[in-house]
Image (cartoon, rainbow, N blue to C red):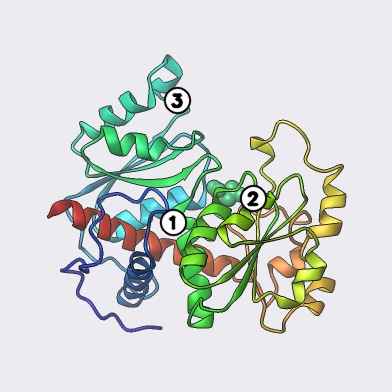
Amino acid sequence: MSVATTDFREIPAVWTRRHLLDLESLSAEELTCILDAAEDFRAATDNCRHKIQVLTGRTVANLFFENSTRTRNSFSLAARRLGADTIEFSSSGSSVSKGETVIDTAKTIEAMNIDAVVIRHRTPGTPLLLAKNLQCTVISGGDGPHEHPTQGLLDILTIRQRRGSLEGLTVALVGDIAHSRTARSNIWGLKKLGAHVIVCGPATLVSRHWEEFGVEVAYNLDEILPRCDVLNLLRIQFERQHTRPFPSVREYALLYAMNRERIERAKDDILIMAPGPINRGVEITPDVADGPHSVILEQVTNGLAIRMAVLWLTLGAGRS
Ligand code: ASP
C-alpha cells in the first residue's frame, strides 16, 4: 500500500477544474493528479474503509436518469467517506414523469444548496449542459455512449497499481466499442498515459475510424491475444442498439469471450478487467471472472478511491 503524502489541505497546483465531464479534455498531468490523489486516499483511509473529513458541510447530489449499481453507490459512499451529505435522485418516481426537463430538475436540486451534482443520463452532452446552466460542480457519471470518466480512471488506476506504469503496455478493449462510454474514456486516458490501445470486436461494433486517433483496430481476438498485457471486456449494450449486431450471443461468445482456453494462450501475467455488470458466459466465462487473472473487484475498490479524489479535487477547486 502506498503511503499518503498529503494531508489533503491543498489542491495540487496542476488541478484547476470545477467539473469533471470527460477524459478527452484532460492532460496527462491532470490524469496523473487524480490517480495520485486516489492512491493517497486509499492509503490514508485503509483502502477507503475509514472517513477523512475533508468535505464536511458540503452536499453532493446523485442525479441518475439511467440504472446504476457500482457508480451510484460508489459516488455516494465516497462523498460520505469525505464527510459530505448526499441526496439521492432517481428519475423513476420523480417529477420527470410529469414532464420536467433535466435542467429544471437539476436547478431544483441545486436550490437545496448543494455543492456538486453527479449526473448520469442517456443523452451524450448532458453533463456539459448542466455545467453551463448550474453554479455548482458537475461530475459525469456516464452520458449515453459518450464517456464515463470515473470508470476510465478506475480502470487505469487498477492497471497502474499492478504494473507501476501505463507506458508501453498493450491494452485491448474487447466488445461493443460503438456503444460503450467506458471504451471512449479508456481510449483517451490510456493513450495520454502512454499505453498502446487495441479495440477489438465484431465489425458491426468496431469502427475503423478509431485508427485516426492512433488506436489499433482488430476483429480477431485470437490474433491479438498473445501481445496483450490487459484485456478489458466490455458488455454488449443491447439497450442502446436497434438491430442485432451479430447473429447470436452464442456466436459472439465463441469468437470473443475470454475463457480458460484463451487464458492459456495469453501472457502469464495478463490482467482481465471488466467494468461490470458482467454477463457470465457472454463476454467472460465464470472461471475466468473468478480466476487469478481477474481484477474486477479491485476495480470496484479503486472506483471508491477515484471518486473520493474527484470530489475532493473538483470541490476544492470550486472553493477558491
Ligand atoms: N457500468 C458501465 C457503464 O455504465 C458499463 C456497462 O454498463 O456495461 O457504462
Q: Secondary structure at mark 1?
A: helix
Task: Give the mark toward the camera: 2 or 3.
Answer: 2
Query: Which circle marks residue 150 in the picture?
Result: 1
Is 86 rendered above or below residue 11? Answer: above
Q: Is label 2 in contact with label 3 (beta carbons under 8 Å)?
A: no
**Residue 50: x and y, percent?**
32, 69
Q: Earlier in the sequence, mark 2 or mark 1?
A: 1
Q: Is residue 121 left or right of residue 41?
A: right
Q: Quadrant of the C terminus?
A: bottom left
Q: Quadrant of the N terminus?
A: bottom left
Q: Is residue 179 left or right of residue 288?
A: left
Q: Secondary structure at mark 3?
A: loop
Query: Which circle marks residue 93 in the picture?
Result: 3
**Residue 36: x and y, percent?**
35, 73
Q: Earlier in the sequence, mark 3 or mark 1?
A: 3
Task: Give the mark toward the camera: 3 or 1.
Answer: 1
**Residue type at the position of mark 3:** Gly
**Residue type at the position of mark 1:** Thr
Q: Is residue 184 left or right of residue 286?
A: left
Q: Residue at x 54, y 59 (%)?
A: 187
Q: Earlier in the sequence, mark 2 or mark 3?
A: 3
Q: Which residue is mark 2?
A: 209
Q: CA distance from mark 2 to mark 3?
A: 40 Å
Q: Residue at x 20, y 62 (%)?
A: 54
